[in-house]
Amino acid sequence: MKVYATVKQLGKRKNHIGEKEIELAGSPETLRQLIMEVVTASVKEFNHSLDKHAIFMYLTEEELENRAALGKVGFKEKHNTTKEDEQKAAERALLAFEDGLYKVLINKQEIESLDAKLTVQEDDRLVFIKLTMLSGRMW
C-alpha cells in the first residue's frame, strides 16, 4: 500500500521534508501499527542508503532546483555510518508519540490514541507534526 507522508514543525513555514511516498507492507489497523510500519520503512531506506558509495558526488540541475526549493542544498553525505535497529527505532517513535513530541494527522484528521482503529487506504496523506519544547527562563 502506498501512502504519502510529510513532516512539519510548528513555527516553520516550510515542510521539514516534502511529501514523500512510503510503501507500507500491509494495511495497519491502529496508529501503533502505522507508526511501526512507517519507521520500519524509513529505517530500511536509511540503512540501504549507507551501503551506497558514490565515487564522485554531483547534483543534476533538477536536484539542485528541488533542494533549493526546500531550502537546503547539499550532497546528503552521511557522516554517521552506523546502521539503525528497526525495532529500537520503532520503540523510540512510539515513546515520543506517548510523550507528546509529535502529532499524527491522516487526511487532515488528528489521531490521538495509539490504539485507535484506523482505515488507511491507498494514497492517503499522513502528516507528522513535530512539537518543540520552549526554552528560556521563567520570570
Image (tube, rainbow, N blue to C red):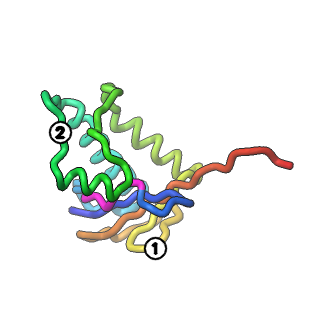
Sequence order check, earlier mark of 1 and 2: 2
| Residue 77 to residue 137: above or below | above
- Residue corresponding to mark 1: 109
- Residue corresponding to mark 2: 58
Residue in view at x 49 percent, y 69 percent: 110
Q: Secondary structure at mark 1?
A: strand
Q: Position of residue 62 (x, y in %)?
A: 18, 55
Q: Quadrant of residue 76?
A: top left
| Residue 48 to residue 133: above or below | above
Crowd class of label 2 (few under 14; some 14 to 19; many from 20; radius 10 Å): few
Q: Quadrant of residue 20?
A: bottom left
Residue 139 lies in the magenta stretch? no
Q: Position of residue 53 (x, y in %)?
A: 16, 29
At label 2, the amino acid type is Tyr
Report the residue that reaches farthest toward the right: 139
Q: In the rendered structure, which segment of residues is drawn in magenta?
A: 16-21
Residue in view at x 50 percent, y 57 percent: 9
Q: Secondary structure at mark 2?
A: loop
